[in-house]
Amino acid sequence: MRALLFVSIVLASGALAQDCGEAVNNANYGVKATYSTKASSNGKYPEGTKVDFSCQYGLFVKGSDNATCVKGEWEPREDARTRRCPYLCQLSQLRSKGYRSMWVDGADGKRDWFPHGTSAYAYCYPNVSDMPIFEPPNLMCIDGGWQPTRGKGNCLKGK
């Protein structure tokens, strides 16, 4: 009788709701989580809690943009590398591609990191006076890398 009671208690405890931990961590590059309920004193979220994920700069999360706490896990389950915000681009990185002059319209010249979707100008010319006037931007930040919008994308010979 005691064994049957013990088995019943164990089976019943397995059916109890299980709380979830944080839905994002430092590996989720730039993802902000907004939970439908507050965490309990132990930092866990009750089963049924919904979470919405967002990024800075109005960008979209790569991967699912929401999840629900189900049996102690966030569903849909995703690897930290798949749910993230697009990476930033470093303007000075363009020097390694041979560019001599680079800038982003409206930037103060002190910033080096720019968000996904930023358009930039970069030229091979050593002197500003040699640069073409009134040309559209020739590079765009796409998930951490500067991609050419026209031209070959670098100033190095043979590349």
Image (spheres, rainbow, N blue to C red):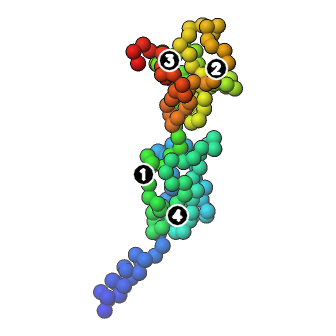
- The residue shown at (45%, 65%) is 72
Camera-nearest residue between 73 and 58 = 58
Residue at the spot of label 2: 135
Camera-nearest residue between 125 and 86 = 125
Dot placed on the residue nearer the N-terminal end, 4 or 2: 4
Residue 79: mark in rendering: 1
Dot placed on the residue nearer the N-terminal end, 2 or 1: 1
Task: Give the distance between the C-alpha atoms of the residues marked 4 and 2, in whole angstroms.
Answer: 48 Å
Task: Give the distance between the C-alpha atoms of the residues marked 2 and 1, in whole angstroms.
Answer: 42 Å
Residue at the spot of label 3: 95
**Would you say the residues marked 1 and 3 are in contact, meaning their CB atoms lie under 8 Å apart?**
no
Q: Amino acid at mark 2?
A: Glu
Camera-nearest residue between 153 and 145 = 153
Q: Amino acid at mark 3?
A: Arg
Q: Quadrant of the C terminus?
A: top left
Residue 70: x and y in percent read 48, 67
Where disc 3 sits, the SS reads: helix
